[in-house]
Amino acid sequence: MENRHNPILPVVMNGIRFDILEHGHLKADSSWHHLNVNSPFNRLYLVTAGEGAIRNAHQSIRLLPGHAYLIPTHTPYDYICEESLEKYYIHFSLGLLQQDDLLDGLDSCITSPVDLDEMRVFLRLSESRNIVELMHFKSYLFRIVCDLLVPVLPEIEADIDIWLKYRLFYQILAHRCTAELKISDIAGSMGIPAPTLSKNFKRDTGKTLKSVLAQRLARQSMELVLLSDSSIKEIAYRLCFRDEFYFSRFFKKHTGLSPREYRKQNSIFKSGGQGTAI
């Protein structure tokens, strides 16, 4: 008798993080016109009717019925509709073991045809309150995203061994990332001297701890500015910045815009709040 198993399977499968941040079924007109939108999350569009377009200096893509579109995080585009456009959208983050978004680094929209009848089933399931139907919705959602990612697999292949080695580091970063978090604090929690941790991390990943901390804090800042109704002062306090002016300087250094400019330029619909679904 033989019993084979993959020891990292449960670790990785239980560590996959697919967080839906916003979703909706949008019927847009010519007012759906947003320039140079650059968001800290991924966008999935399933177009059911009408036509629109997304454009930047490198791509011009028509949004057509019966197609799925995946727009990776931190990829700027203009979003345009001349007459009418109907689409289901999901804004999401995708990570593994508390790491940064798996799609961060992709620099262009990916598209693929999707059967319209299947798309209508997907939309129906998205409105269900039945747990089994929502499980079907989740499996369908994963299949759409996975199918879209097939052409770019070499660009997003994860080094699972490195992530497992620094699993505790990424867990600390996920739960304690504020302006007050220091490398020495992380090293202390891991039981490793700070110089040793910094040296090993740079050797294994090619990145410095300081840059990873700053990038994670910047991404968290962008998400709070864009997805919450909190004031800039409240966000600065939540992330433990000295004051909102210091936070604003940090934010502009990493995005090129002040928090208020970023919120206005990249506004999305929030239940009970202001903004337009993108």
Image (tube, rainbow, N blue to C red):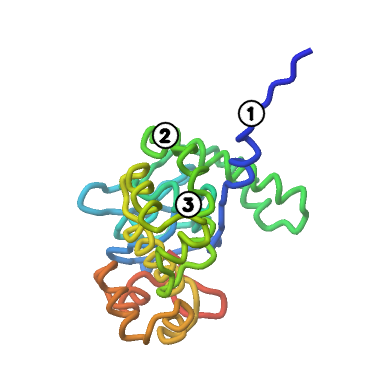
Q: In the image, is 57 to the left or to the right of 88?
A: left
Question: In the image, is residue 276 above or below residue 112?
Answer: below
Question: In the image, is residue 277 above or below residue 107?
Answer: below
- Element on which disc 3 rests: loop
Q: In the image, is 32 to the left or to the right of 47?
A: left
**Could you say where residue 182 lies in the image, as x and y percent from the top left?**
41, 68
- CB under 8 Å between discs 3 and 2: no
- Element on which disc 1 rests: loop
Along the viewing direction, whichever of 102 and 136 lies nearer the viewer: 102
Q: Quadrant of residue 216?
A: bottom left
**Could you say where residue 254 lies in the image, as x and y percent from the top left?**
28, 67
Along the viewing direction, whichever of 261 and 36 lies nearer the viewer: 261
The disc at residue 99 is 3
According to the picture, the residue beneath numbered tag 1 turns out to be: 6
**Could you say where residue 131 lies in the image, as x and y percent from the top left?**
77, 53
- CB under 8 Å between discs 2 and 1: no
**Could you say where residue 194 lies in the image, as x and y percent from the top left?**
40, 58
